[in-house]
Amino acid sequence: MFTLAEVASLNDIQPTYRILKPWWDVFMDYLAVVMLMVAIFAGTMQLTKDQVVCLPVLQSTVNSKAQASTSGKADFTTVEATTDSSGRKTNLDFQQYVFINQMCYHLALPWYSKYFPYLVLIHTIILIVSSNFWFKYPKTCSKIEHFVSILGKCFESPWTTKALSETACEDSEENKQRLTGASSLPKYVSTSSDEGSPSATTPMITKSGFKFSADKPMIEVPSVTILDKKDGEQAKALFEKVRKFRAHVEDSDLIYKLYVGQTVIKTVKFIFILCYTANFVNTISFEHICNPKVEHLIGYTQFECTHNMAYMLKKLLISYISLICVYGFICLYTLFWLFRIPLKEYSFEKVREESSFSDIPDVKNDFAFLLHMVDQYDQLYSKRFGVFLSEVSENKLREISLNHEWTFEKLRQHVSRNAQDKQELHLFMLSGVPDAVFDLTDLDVLKLELIPEAKIPAKISQMTNLQELHLCHCPAKVEQTAFSFLRDHLRCLHVKFTDVAEIPAWVYLLKNLRELYLIGNLNSENNKMIGLESLRELRHLKILHVKSNLTKIPPNITDVAPHLTKLVIHNDGTKLVVLNSLKKMTNVAELELQSCELERIPHAIFSLSNLQELDLKSNSIRTIEEIISFQHLKRLTCLKLWHNKIVNIPSSITHIKNLESLYLSNNKLESLPAAVFSLQKLRCLDVSYNSILLIPVEIGLLQNLQHFHITGNKIDVLPKQLFKCVKLRTLSLGQNCITSIPDKISQLVQLTHLELKGNCLDRLPATLGQCQLLRKSGLVVEDHLFDALPSEVKEVLNQDTSIPFANGI
């Protein structure tokens, strides 16, 4: 027989799995142990005492039979004679009785009496295996093991206690706020009726215009528990584990099906045991008639036998049937529970109601089933586990960790001075915006890049010097007080995005904004270019910079046109077709249309009477015959047509009398017409990187020319008239075919930058020393040419640049 210890190992489940054992499973385990003890007790009794005692039935009168029957009940082991109780001889000796007892044990005794303990043992083992198979099956036990491990860590995590404790504090604070009323709100909190709208972080576009509702001011709650860095890292790891486990488990319902399957098997097993046991319960009897058919050996044909274990086996059988009935009813209850409610769905509704984590998602399939099983153990487990399913909770943890890492001192070390000599802080790829940022009250520029969960709290109102904000792939949310501050103080905003939906909607309500830079895709059919159409509220906007892929300038951009002074469109190679709306932008002084695939100068530009600077860089312009129309633009002083495909300059350029700067670099010019040199006000001429062969002598007419760039052409001779332009400060002659520099270069007394590198020069003129403002740092030439200069010239060129006349540059 098996011992209890050997069989009990089948029911050995790790103690940590007890949280997945509901009361019925625990009760059935105990019932299985009792049935196991019945089987072992019955088997032990059979091995030690199970036997039958038989006496022959004599051919005599009924009374004799009765007497023989009475005498047959005596223990044959005490009979040493071969006579019956009446004194009649039976002609049987001791060995013959042993032989008959053994034969009749197998022939007369019912099989159920002989194998009852073994049947009970087998049935019990099957029931035990069925109860715990889902803990052993590889495809389910791995998920269960991970779930139990994660659940235990989530339950014991300090972050769980802190999050739930702070939730209780926040609830208490919110109740106080309701009692004290709106009078206690900070200075910039709006009392708009839209505050309680569902989309509390973004404005809504309606038929009547914008309605803005910012985040409610966050209530400062003192930390109930202290979360050190190690605990914070462990909590972060738990959030990641829960996220991955959910994705792994929610896609199947194998655990649920397996549990249902093993419950069905136990129920079928119970019905089977009950049916066949009921038929054999009456076969266990104390008396049996045996016909061994060994009359030729013994002389008797019939024996009457007694089974000494019949009484005990019958009692054990009744006990076993009782246990099985209880076991079966529990199985039926389990099936009722499994199908009464949808166990493949689990709602955290109660947890959401009791805490501030209203974003805890409902789960499904095996994840939901495991949580239902845990609830049978203790619902507190699922409540604490729900904390790690909440994005709000995760964001709070990130915020605590972020503030722990990015202290005021560390942020101060990252503050730098930009090109405009302003204090600038650039934060890149953080989980949020550290609170200490808003203690940098002297900060001028704040750059936030790749911070998807950025939130701007009311503390930003301390940063009175802040006038420029950069949001690069950072759809920041603002509290209501913070928005009020930004609306009144922010002057320059840069927004870089992938889709227009990433632009925070509060951007369109910054009424005092002066400069707006938008970089991203605005030409999506889904968004209908809402980004530009929503600018109507920016009534003080002066500069609009758009880097996108527009096919047309939206008509509604004219809402801001009357007060725009500068419009910049970088189109990244997408052809800009419709430009008629430009005509309404009468106050624009600077217009820049880069990479718009323009083939001609747009006619709409000729209506911009206040235009002072036009930049058509990186287009496909081949001809500029329309340039004659620029004569109507009396204020045009700067024309940039660089990086195009222009072949020649029409003589009509002479009509642009007020032109001061002309940029024609990186085109296909082969000559410079005399008409260019009739522009007496021209101060800057850039024709670099063309195919120009010579500099016309008419260049001497440009007495106001200060900057002349002709680098990267095919010039071989410098005309003497060039040196009549005595106001030249910058002269770029590099990468040409020039063989010598005339001594008359000394006439350029205001020259500060001279580029000669990349020519065919043998020497430099010694008269370079007479260019009083020229220094070595402004002389771009090969080293050997500089070294060949006379020493006194080199000394002059090597003088300190911080001389008094430098102010005249």
Image (cartoon, helix red, strand yellow):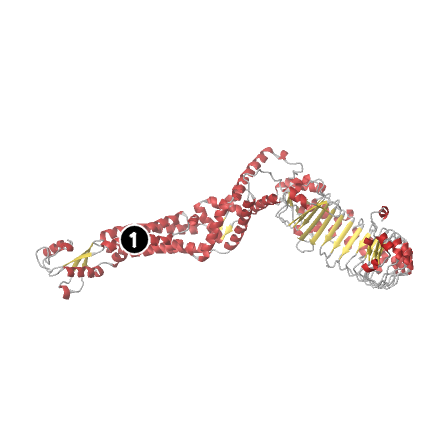
Left of 61 or right of it: where is 763? right
Q: Position of residue 631 (x, y in %)?
A: 87, 54
Few, some or many residues within 10 Å of mark 1 (<14, 14–19, 20+): many
Is 70 located above or below residue 443 in the figure? below
Q: Is residue 537 visible?
A: yes
Q: Position of residue 759 (x, y in %)?
A: 83, 62
Is 431 located above or below residue 651 in the figure? above
* Residue picked out by circle 1: 40
Q: Position of residue 573 (x, y in %)?
A: 73, 59
Is 438 located above or below residue 111 in the figure? above
Left of 468 or right of it: where is 381? left
Left of 263 or right of it: where is 635? right
Name the amino acid type tagged 1: Ile
* Rendered residue at 21%/53% (across/down): 308
* Rendered residue at 86%/59% (across/down): 764
Mark 1 secondary-structure assignment? helix
* Rendered residue at 75%/54% (across/down): 569
- Among all residues in the image, which is located at the extreme front? 791
* Image quarter of the N terminus: bottom left
- Among all residues in the image, which is located at the extreme left? 87
Q: Position of residue 109 (x, y in %)?
A: 22, 58
Give residue 423's quadrant in the image. Answer: top right
Number of labels in the image equals 1
Give residue 498's quadrant in the image. Answer: bottom right
Q: Is residue 211 visible?
A: no
Give residue 60's quadrant in the image. Answer: bottom left
Left of 629 or right of it: where is 121? left
